[in-house]
Image: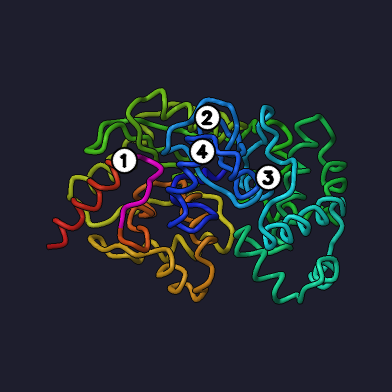
Amino acid sequence: MGAVLNEQMTMLPDQQDEFWNAVLSKDRAFDGQFVFAVSSTGIYCRPSCPSRRPKRENVSFFALPAAAESGGFRACLRCHPGDGPTTDPQLAMVQQVCRFIEISNGEAVTLDTLSDQVGVSSFHLQRTFKSVMGMSPSEYAETRRVNKFKQSVQAGEKITDAIYDAGFGSSSRLYELASSQLGMTPATYGKGGRGAVIYYAIGDSPLGRLLVAATDKGVCSVRLADSDDQLTTELRREFFAAEILLEESRLQPALTAVVDHLNDKTPRIDLPLDIRATAFQRQVWEQLQKIPAGETYSYSEVAKGIGQGKAVRAVARACASNPVALVIPCHRVIREDNSLGGYRWGLDRKKKLLERERMRAK
């Protein structure tokens, strides 16, 4: 999954504190308004879920269960967050569209057909759906098809049968999506990830323990944490189907490049990358890489920078799915009110990073 975390979510940044307080108090009044997902478990819940409260840095918020599932999270078996209607009319409309797409069994559904189903213009539907889900109805349908393919091969179905049962008219379309949606070819995915090898190394940094992981093509993950166990557990959870190997000598140059940057020895981190991304995510990540060290942008400023000023929520989701800390500087995005908000790798690290960069820029 593309770990969607903290402030970087489908909700507007100024709603985070309110939603987090609702989660802490298990407030039933917020059920139907949002769900919260936990990166350390891969599960999403309703606010009133009786389960133990997670750490704030592991939590992200989604407007609808369908959005959380598109982000790779599974529904909680205790609180059943996918059951029941939402309380917001716009969210209810998007939820209705999602369900119509789901029951289409992978068949192509046009935007006009969907707009007729909910009684609004196709323009209004497209805009509302994208603002809530961070993707268009057609992108959501494609995500559903890929997820169905994954479930089928995990259940032991043949690759060819799984491709067509998921609604792909041919295998070529799925192969086109392989790098961004599967992280490997469909055949490799069908073998449980055998043949997909990821190497990693861990070392000290000014911000704690640092992990760098890579395939033969390039760096696929850069992570920060307090312990090696936490780093390796999260890496294996994200790349659950791959073979994970500790290769310190192989990854030492990449590890050194990141540490040197943190120690102000290099102005940027230049490493070949092998990361999964949609076209929209790549737009956002490229924009983040344009933010000068020592400066910060708000979500809306990033959205305007890519020519999609209203796509604030989608930008937040794209920031959250950034798999390579520091290389793509998502820490340079803050709330509209200039407060830090949250950070996947911990607020203290975000604060230190920004302070160091501001000092360096003087």
Find residue 302 and name its label.
Answer: none
Q: Earlier in the sequence, mark 2 or mark 4?
A: 4
Secondary structure, mark 2, is helix
Q: Name the N-terminal-most of marks 3 and 1.
A: 3
Q: Residues within 10 Å of mark 4 (few under 14, many from 20)?
A: many
Closer to the eye: label 2 or 4: 4
Q: Residue at x 41, y 43 (%)?
A: 344
Q: Which residues are magenta?
A: 339-347
Classify residue 270 as left or right of residue 161: left
- The dot on residue 23 is 4
Residues at circles 1 and 4 in contact by the CB criterion of under 8 Å: no
Residue found at the very far front of the displayed protein: 29
Sooner in the amino-acid sequence: mark 2 or mark 3: 3
Tell me what residue is drawn at x 65 percent, y 71 percent: 127
Q: Residues within 10 Å of mark 3 (few under 14, many from 20)?
A: some
Q: Residue at x 19, y 52 (%)?
A: 355
Can you say whether 338 is above or below 146 in the image?
below
Q: Earlier in the sequence, mark 2 or mark 1?
A: 2
Spatial separation of the CA atoms under disc 2 and disc 4: 27 Å
Dot 2 surroundings within 10 Å: few (below 14), some, or many (20 or more)?
some
**Screen quadrant of the N terminus:** top right
Report the residue marked by disc 3. Answer: 185
Q: Which structural element holds mark 1?
A: helix
Element type at mark 3:
loop
> Label 3 to label 1, Cα distance in Å?
28 Å
Three-letter amino acid code at the position of disc 3: Thr
Relative side of 192 to 233, left or right: right
Task: Report if residue 239 lies within the magenta region.
Answer: no
Give the CA distance from mark 3 to mark 4: 38 Å
Q: Which residue is mark 1?
A: 253
| Residue that label 2 marks | 236
Whole-percent x, y for residue 322 in the image: 46, 50
